[in-house]
């Protein structure tokens, strides 16, 4: 499923309208967790964004886009019009690859502060996955993202605020595995890897080698 591009109060917003509830796993600031969702939103924030209520910001943006029901939304300092959407045998991924000046290593020992950036990944499966398989798929997406960043010469595995949203049909026979060598997980991994690698080519190379 590919996103709709909107402009809301001068901000770029990607919107997915499902038309029916989909089962989602989300680390988003709004609508996170596992449950049925009817829409997804990914919005650009300014580089000096300092709101302490990002979830409320997502709710306001959703209302402005005419979204109703239960949804989930993420934010990023990259212009979401630079999104890259890839599909691998029915699994579709949209990534907005915002690195900023300070990518980080997941196991880094430094104290982390919020800085503009954020890589957001939204993925859609054509078949239902069990909750356990969805959890596994989140790990698969993170591994594929990290692989793309390392191959792209980024000194880190992501940013402190990266978010992932994965969705699948809420009914039907369920796949039990979402790892990188499972049927659906391998397709997700290839799609995430391709989208993030392509996104790096449009992201400014501004990171510090000291991170």
Image (spheres, rainbow, N blue to C red):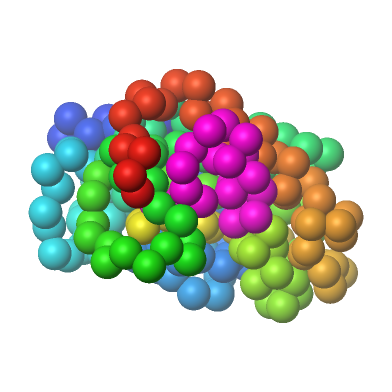
> Going 12% across and 57% down the picture, which residue do you hit?
51
> Going 36% across and 24% down the picture, which residue do you hit?
204
Task: For residue 71, say whether it is visible.
Answer: no
Q: Quadrant of residue 53?
A: bottom left
What x and y, as percent, mark residue 76? 32, 45
Q: Is residue 193 above or below residue 173?
A: above
Q: Residue furthest bottom?
A: 132
Give the magenta part as a residue range. 141-159
What x and y, as percent, mark residue 79? 32, 31
Task: For residue 77, say whether it is visible.
Answer: yes
Judge from the rendering whether residue 65 lies leftward or rightward of residue 48; answer left or right: right
Q: Quadrant of residue 55?
A: bottom left
Pick the residue in front: 52 or 114.
114
Pick the residue in front: 44 or 128.
44
Pick the residue in front: 115 or 156.
156
Q: Residue furthest front?
A: 210
Judge from the rendering whether residue 123 lies leftward or rightward of residue 164; answer left or right: right
What x and y, as percent, mark residue 194? 66, 33
Magenta stretch holds residue 51 = no
């Amino acid at each position: 499923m590919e996103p709709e591009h909107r402009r809301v109060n001068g901000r770029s917003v990607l919107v997915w309208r499902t038309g029916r509830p989909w089962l989602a796993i989300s680390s988003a600031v709004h609508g996170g967790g596992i449950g049925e969702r009817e829409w997804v939103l990914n919005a650009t924030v300014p580089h000096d964004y300092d709101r302490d209520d990002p979830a409320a910001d997502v709710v306001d943006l959703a209302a402005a886009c005419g979204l109703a029901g239960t949804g989930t939304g993420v934010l990023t300092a990259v212009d979401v019009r630079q999104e890259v959407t890839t599909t691998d045998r029915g699994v579709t991924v949209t990534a907005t690859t915002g690195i900023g000046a300070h990518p980080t290593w997941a196991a880094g020992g430094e104290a982390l502060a919020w800085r503009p950036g954020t890589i957001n990944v939204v993925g859609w499966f054509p078949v239902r996955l069990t909750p356990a398989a969805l959890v596994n798929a989140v790990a698969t997406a993170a591994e594929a993202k990290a692989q793309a960043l390392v191959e792209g010469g980024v000194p880190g595995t992501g940013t402190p605020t990266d978010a992932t949203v994965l969705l699948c049909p809420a009914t039907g026979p369920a796949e039990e595995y979402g790892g990188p060598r499972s049927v659906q997980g391998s397709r997700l991994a290839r799609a995430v890897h391709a989208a993030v690698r392509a996104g790096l080519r449009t992201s400014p190379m501004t990171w510090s080698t000291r991170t």
